Amino acid sequence: MVYFSGGGVQIFSIGMVAMLLSTPFRAFSGINDGSCFQFSRTVGIYAHLTVFAPFAPSNANNPRSFDTLLVQKVVFILCNCLALLVGAWKCHQMGLLPVGTGDWLAFERRGQVRSVIPLLC
């Protein structure tokens, strides 16, 4: 969906890039804490489950442990890191990243100019 945002700096493009950069961080925080809900018929409320807990093997001691489904979680993290890289690339294409020397002129320190011609006494 990044190709829909265009290359200019408009409100729609900024919103798309902001969502592209914020979604992986929300996904990182929800690996073991949970971001999906399942309705429990016995209790009658929404039970807070983790993203990977429903897919844990039945013989797992703790389905919310990081060791459970480790390979799948690592692939999930790598895919979200790839989304962050796409977001950084899109920011660079839009000109939002300060990568040129002209972007850092406010922080450049100039030394004192010494005279090239020595004073004759």
Image (cartoon, grey):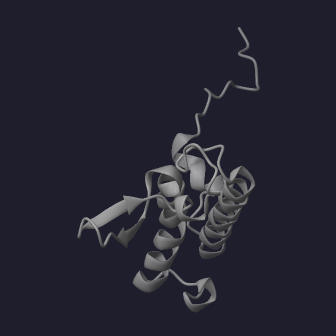
Q: Position of 102 compared to 121: left or right?
A: left
* Above or below 103: residue 88: below
Q: Position of residue 22 (x, y in %)?
A: 48, 63
Tell me where residue 78 sits by quadrant. bottom right
Task: Give the residue displayed 60% in from the left and 44% down from the top.
Answer: 66
Task: Give the residue displayed 58% in from the left and 49% down from the top.
Answer: 104
* Above or below 48: residue 63: above
Task: Give the residue displayed 43% in from the left and 63% down from the top.
Answer: 35
Q: Position of 72 compared to 104: left or right?
A: right
Q: Position of residue 42 (x, y in %)?
A: 28, 68
Q: Quadrant of the N terminus?
A: bottom right
Q: How many marks?
A: 0
Q: Position of residue 90 (x, y in %)?
A: 63, 73
Q: Nearer the viewer, residue 24 or 110?
A: 24
Q: Quadrant of the C terminus?
A: top right
Q: Position of residue 85 (x, y in %)?
A: 68, 63
Task: Give the residue displayed 65% in from the left and 57% down from the top.
Answer: 57
Tell me where residue 2 sits by quadrant. bottom right
Q: Position of 110 compared to 19: left or right?
A: right
In the picture as drawn, the residue positioned furthest to the top comes out as 121
Q: Nearer the viewer, residue 18 or 29?
A: 29
In the picture as drawn, the residue positioned furthest to the bottom comes out as 4
Q: Nearer the viewer, residue 17 or 35?
A: 35
Q: Nearer the viewer, residue 34 or 23?
A: 34
